[in-house]
Image (spheres, rainbow, N blue to C red):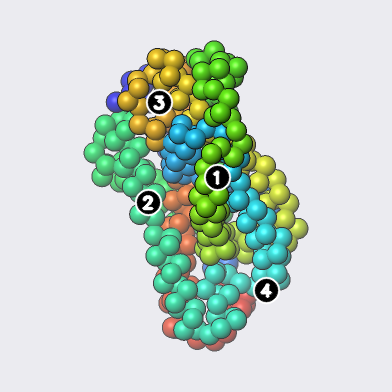
Amino acid sequence: MIQLAALDWLIVGAYLASMTALGIWLSRRGGSFTDFFLAGRSLTTPMLIATLVSSYYGIDVLTATPQLAYTYVVVTWVGLGRPAYLFLLIAALLVASRLRTEPFVSLPDVMVRYYDQNVGYTGTVASFLYSVPALQLYGFGLIGELLFEWPPYLSILLFGSVALVYTLGGSFLGVVVTDAVQFVIMCVTLAVAVPFSLSMIGGFDSMIGTLGTEYFEPMGNLSPWLFLVYAMTYLVVFVEPGFYQRIFAARSSKVIRNAFLLGIVLWGAFDWICTILGMVAKTAVLQGAMDAGLPADQSLLAVVFAVLPTGLLGLFLAGVLATQMSTLDSCCLVAGGNISYDVYRPLVNPRPRTESSCV
């Protein structure tokens, strides 16, 4: 268990309380189902960037990317992660612009439009199972167990309840607004951690000297087949329900294009920071500054806990929670929409689903 000062606990508590209060405040807004589920199709470029970047990154990125960097170093960023940006770019420029011309509400809507209702129901089941936030809730349990030595169920109940309150109360607009707050917190705290962590090992030049130049080969010595396998996993973006929800919520195709172009830059920066912190952990272990038995998937957390001062550590922990909540809230909203819109609505009102039938 890490030792937190009173200021750190205060910051974490203030973050959780503010997210809950924001959701309750936004719950006063009324409107149609489209207003609730797609924020009235009003997302601007900054709003779309914030919700895209934050919702795609959770505790898995904060553990998996540094773990790969700890083992393979630079190739993690250059070779293993970059295909994702290519597929995101294709999805934004070719897929999103076409789909945004019709009044779709959900991914199963697309299936109904181009196939039939039975195919739509199949897509609904797949979308629901994909969106059930089991992995995100597990992440909360892991955070509580690793950081506070809480039983997993306690962390799941506490953090999951906060996310559920502001998601159900504030609708998709609440998700977007809280995502924007979470986006700022997680980006700032990780960026601040970099200079602190590099100073611990003597700077970037010291890292190169300790690890050796072979660790900095852009493509490493990994098999091309391994790169192909990693690249193919990113095809998931084309069936990602949350991705389509954000496309349908955008104000225009231009907003989608601009958000993805700028978002790719931010995704790249976030991934690079996680890679750097994993490399710092590897260097610190070789220099004897950190325990040689450090689990690779905890490398980023171990480095940050070792270098950040009081106050910044509390802000970082709020950022860790933010990354997880920003993914959980999106999953909850999509899964709920699958039940209420994609299953219940066509059963009680089987007419063709158009924009006018969503109000």
Residue at 49% over, 78% down: 120
| Residue behind mark 1 | 80
Say which quarter of the image contains residue 16: top left
Say which quarter of the image contains residue 352: bottom right
Tags 4 and 2 touching, CB below 8 Å:
no
- Mark 3 falls on what kind of element? helix
Tags 3 and 1 touching, CB below 8 Å:
no
The first of marks 2 and 1 along the sequence is: 1
Amino acid type for the residue under numbered disc 1? Leu
Q: Nearer the viewer, mark 4 or mark 1?
A: 1
Amino acid type for the residue under numbered disc 2? Leu
Cα gap from disc 3 to disc 1, whole angstroms: 23 Å
Please indicate, yes or no, whether residue 352 appears anywhere in the rendered image.
yes
The first of marks 3 and 2 along the sequence is: 2
Residue at 29% over, 26% down: 1
The image shows residue 238 at horizontal and vertical percentages of 57, 63
The first of marks 4 and 2 along the sequence is: 4
The image shows residue 159 at horizontal and vertical percentages of 36, 43
Above or below, 310 relative to 39: above
Nearest the camera: 323 or 231? 231
The first of marks 4 and 3 along the sequence is: 4
Q: Nearer the viewer, mark 4 or mark 2?
A: 2
User: In the image, is 154 to the left or to the right of 183?
Assistant: left
| Residue behind mark 2 | 135
Please indicate, yes or no, whether residue 182 appears anywhere in the rendered image.
no
Amino acid type for the residue under numbered disc 3? Ala
